[in-house]
Image (cartoon, rainbow, N blue to C red):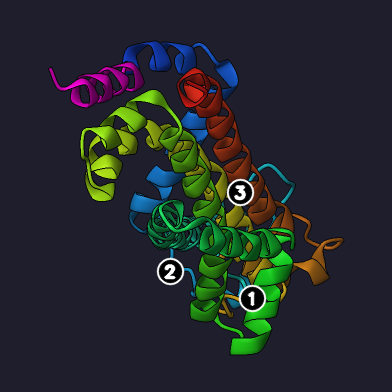
Amino acid sequence: MNYARINGLSHRLKLFQTKPSWQMFSHNHGAMFGAFILCLFILFAIIGPWLAPYDPAQQFSNKTFQPPIWNLGGNFSHFFGTDDLGRDLLSRLLHGARLSLFLSLFVLFVAASIGVIIGAIAAFLPPIFRSGLMRIMDLILSLPSLLLAIIVVAIIGPGINNAVYAVILVLIPQFVKITQNSISQELLKDYSMAAKLDGASHTRLLFKHIRPNIIPAIIVQLTFSFSTALLDIAALGFLGLGAQPPLAEWGTMLAQSRAYIQYAPWTMALPGLAIFLTILSVNLVGDGLRDALDPQINQ
């Protein structure tokens, strides 16, 4: 009887008992609220350009600083009001949702793909090379992600494309670290030892036995890295190092409105609230996933 195959299968069955995990997640009210808000923002990002009443760059010169509907002087033609150039804030927020969220998802996909590959390779390297690589990752992770992104953008120049490259470089070490640590822990377990004694190669051991067991840890890391990507892209836009006007990116909208915070506070409060709610929802979902998958991660 092939003990490694049976043991690996038993671990996969344990890890992919999704019903208990979903029940635990669904009973977490904070996580469910976060999932609802996040899905709502993603929906706005997908269909926002069709919902927007105006072009985000269209200017109404006779309607500058029109207040939102709930303030005195507001009307339904510009539900969230207008900015200093008379641009409709609702339209800019909806277009900004697509730009901010989709850029963050792209950054997350690229950083995770590269980081997981490097982390998987590092786990099978000789100890001296693995230790050296991990010390470099630790050094990078010791710096605040935003500070490191600012340094990278300062070197390669401002702009939305360079901001994306910078945030990707910042996030890669997080996935390298979590992948390498997770695989190293799995290699010490009995089923991995049995698979190696059974003659399994590193590739077979990784993809057939270890891979299912490290997915929960990577999923949790994805959620928290998503909020980091969103915040860093918005912060770079706010500092003038990311998206440049007239792009309707939430961080750039904040930067353009800070001079009018006393006269027209809604122009800064609305994009700030959008960033806050999105990051809050992602972190709530991440906490819920961590709690639901934690028993599996710690097996």
> What residue is disc 3 on?
274
Q: Residues within 10 Å of mark 2 (few under 14, many from 20)?
A: few
Callout 3 amino acid: Ala
3D distance between C-alphas at marks 3 and 2: 19 Å
Q: Contact, CB < 8 Å: mark 1 with mark 2? A: no
Callout 1 amino acid: Leu
Q: Residue furthest right?
A: 262
Q: Contact, CB < 8 Å: mark 3 with mark 2? A: no
Callout 2 amino acid: Asp
Q: Quadrant of residue 65?
A: bottom right
Q: Residue 173, position in %: x, y?
A: 56, 59
Tell me where the magenta segment starts and ends, as one range. 1-17
Say whether disc 1 or disc 3 marks the residue closer to the N-terminus: 1
Residue 55 is marked as: 2
Vertical comparison of 248 with 277: above or below:
below
3D distance between C-alphas at marks 1 and 2: 13 Å
Residue 85 is marked as: 1
Q: Secondary structure at mark 1?
A: loop
Q: Residue 201, position in %: x, y?
A: 23, 47
Side (left or right) of 240 relative to 265: left
Residue located at (58% from left, 80% from top): 244
Vertical comparison of 39 with 274: above or below:
above
Q: Residues within 10 Å of mark 1 (few under 14, many from 20)?
A: some
Q: Secondary structure at mark 2?
A: loop
Q: Quadrant of residue 111?
A: bottom left
